[in-house]
Amino acid sequence: MLRVWWRLTRGYRLRPWKSPYLRWRIETYSGLDARSIGFWSFWGFSWRERRNLLRYLRWAGGMDASAGMKNSPRRRGGAEKGKDDPDQSG
């Protein structure tokens, strides 16, 4: 969950209310104008929607974990080349 938050606030970790990406997400979710989102409106939105935000962070963290399992070196390198792996012919 914290890994997702860390990735989403990249470049704006000490001032997430200035992140164009987070402003855009808030605008599409709530209808607030992204240009008008400042410190107080960002934190007010975050407080009002804290349950949904936490639920989203948990969900996204789970998606990251499952994607990591699919792309782990053990799974990629574990299959023998040939008939079982369509990407590896021969």
Image (spheres, rainbow, N blue to C red):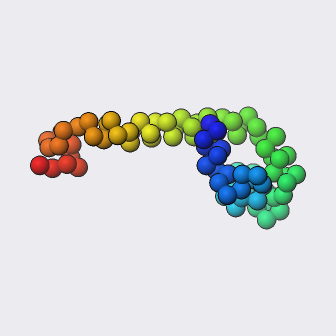
Relative to 85, does residue 30 appear above or below in the rendering?
below
The structure residue drawn at horizontal position 35% and vertical position 40%, both measured from the top left corner, is 73
- Pinpoint residue 39: horizontal percent, then vertical percent: 85, 54
- Pinpoint residue 3: horizontal percent, then vertical percent: 60, 41
- Pinpoint residue 37: horizontal percent, then vertical percent: 81, 58
Counting the numbered discs, the total is 0
Residue 38 found in image quarter? bottom right
Residue 84 found in image quarter? top left
14 left or right of 84? right
62 left or right of 43? left
Relative to 35, does residue 60 appear above or below in the rendering?
above
The structure residue drawn at horizontal position 79% and vertical position 65%, both measured from the top left corner, is 35
Relative to 25, does residue 35 appear above or below in the rendering?
below
The structure residue drawn at horizontal position 26% and vertical position 36%, both measured from the top left corner, is 78
The structure residue drawn at horizontal position 70% and vertical position 61%, both measured from the top left corner, is 20
User: Farthest bottom residue?
Assistant: 35
5 left or right of 62? right
User: Farthest left residue?
Assistant: 90
Q: Can residue 11 be seen in the rendering of this structure?
A: yes
Relative to 80, does residue 45 appear above or below in the rendering?
below
Q: Can residue 26 be seen in the rendering of this structure?
A: no
Query: In the depicted view, which residue is nearer to us: 22 or 31?
Result: 22
Query: Which quarter of the rendering shows the N terminus?
Result: top right
